[in-house]
Amino acid sequence: MTAIEFATSQAKETGYMLGQVLKDWPTDCSRFKTHPSGMSATQQIQHLTECYMAFEAHCDGAPFSWGAYAPPSDDWAVVVAAFENARHSGLSRLAAPTEEMLEHLNAYVIAHDHYHIGQLCALRIACDQTWDPYCIYQT
């Protein structure tokens, strides 16, 4: 397996994990925070959306202005749809991956997704104690 194949497989894996943690997310928990200085699920998903936009821009050789992303809405369904669209659009660059993309893929997607997956799992468990955090893993 090449480095590009490995990195691409990791991006697919984090996509699966994110899909599982967000699946049937209780809407009333979308703004819940475990700590006042922490991020809610809505804030994290909006942040990840911006990260995927940055990944896409850097893969295209374009600069990215952090903080310029204006979420279309704070409605949970709209936030998740924007996230899914940005992730799909950004990762479409992997149809023709280059070695140069690997650094950006790791920074904006692989390592960063894992970080937020853990936070989202903690939020989900705190908000919905019946949720099974092991569902994020493929069998």
Image (spheres, grey):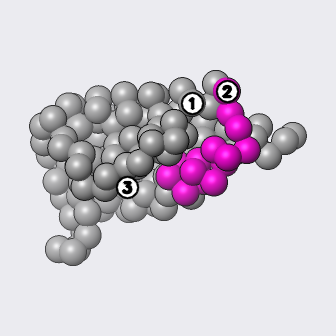
The part of the chain drawn in magenta is 96-109
Sequence-wise first label, 1 or 3: 1
Whether 132 is drawn above or below 81: the answer is below
Q: Secondary structure at mark 1?
A: helix
Tell me the kind of residue under disc 1. Arg
Residue placed most toward the observer, 80 or 27: 80
Q: Tags 1 and 2 in contact by the CB under 8 Å rule?
A: yes
Where residue 116 appears, as percent x and y from the top left, is 43, 57
- Residue type marked 2: Ala
Name the residue: 21% across, 31% down. Answer: 77
Residue 100 in the magenta stretch? The answer is: yes
Gap in angstroms between the C-alphas marked 1 and 3:
26 Å
**Residue 139 visible in this rendered orientation of the protein:** no
Q: Which residue is mark 3?
A: 120
In this rendering, position of residue 107 left or right of residue 6: left
Q: Position of residue 129 (x, y in %)?
A: 32, 55
Q: Is residue 36 magenta?
A: no
- Mark 1–mark 2 Cα distance, whole angstroms, equals 6 Å
- Disc 2 marks which residue? 96
Decide: few, some or many residues near mark 2? Use Cα within 10 Å; few <14, some 14-19, many ≥20. few
Q: Residue at x 25, y 55 (%)?
A: 67
> Is the magenta region chiefly helix, strand or loop?
helix
Nearer to the camera, 119 or 89: 89
Would you call the spot at circle 1 few (<14 residues within 10 Å), some (14-19), or many (20 or more)? Answer: some
Choose the circle earlier in sequence order: 2 or 3. Answer: 2
